[in-house]
Image (spheres, rainbow, N blue to C red):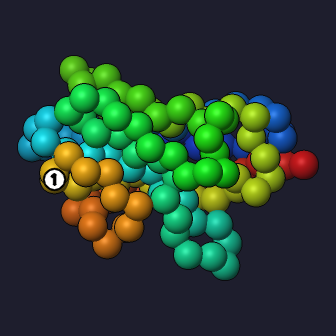
Amino acid sequence: VQLQAFGGGFVQAGGSLRLSCVHSGRTTNDAATAWFRQAPGKGREFVAGIRWSGGNTYYTDSVKGRFTVSKISAKNTVYLQMNSLKPEDTAVYYCALRWGSTVHRTEELYNYWGQGTQVTVSS
C-alpha cells in the first residue's frame, strides 16, 4: 500500500485549500484514513479521519466547522477540504491509513503514511 498526499500550498488567512490522499495497492472497506499535521517545533497531531465503511467522520476540536474530510471510494481517494484557514493551521499535513474500521487519534496505530504536504497560512 502506498499513499500519496498533495494539494498543499500558500494561502492567506481566511482562504481555502483541498488536500488529496490517493491510496494504491491493497484496498478494503475495513480501513480508516486520517489526516495528521505537524507544525514547526511540535509533535504530530490528529486533524480528521474517516471510516471507509460507513463514511463516519471525526475531527479535532480546533478544525470543527472549518475542515471537512470526505472520500471517493472508486478513486481510492480521501480529501481534506480546509476553509477559513488560520495561521495556526500552518503545518506539514500527512495522510495515514490503518486496517480496521476505527479512526484512532494516535499516530502509532496507523500502518501506512503519505509523504506529507506543506500548508502555509499567512496572517
Residue of label 1: 99
Describe residue 11's horizontal placement relative to residue 115 as left or right: right
Secondary structure beneath disc 1?
A: strand
As drawn, 108 above or below 77: below
Residue 70 seen from this side: yes
Residue 21 seen from this side: no
Name the residue located 55 percent from the left edge and 52 percent from the top edge: 60
- Near-viewer residue (5 or 61): 61
Name the residue located 35 percent from the left edge and 28 percent from the top edge: 71
Name the residue located 84 percent from the left edge and 49 percent from the top edge: 122
Residue 74 percent location from the top left of the image: 22, 20
Tally of numbered discs: 1
Residue 18 percent location from the top left of the image: 56, 32
The three-letter code of the residue at mark 1 reads Trp
- Near-viewer residue (123 or 33): 33
Name the residue located 66 percent from the left edge and 35 percent from the top edge: 66
Q: Quadrant of residue 104?
A: bottom left
As drawn, 120 above or below 11: below
**Residue lying furthest bottom:** 41
- Near-viewer residue (46 or 123): 46
Describe residue 65's horizontal placement relative to residue 110 as left or right: right
Describe residue 75's horizontal placement relative to residue 93 as left or right: left
Residue 7 percent location from the top left of the image: 54, 38
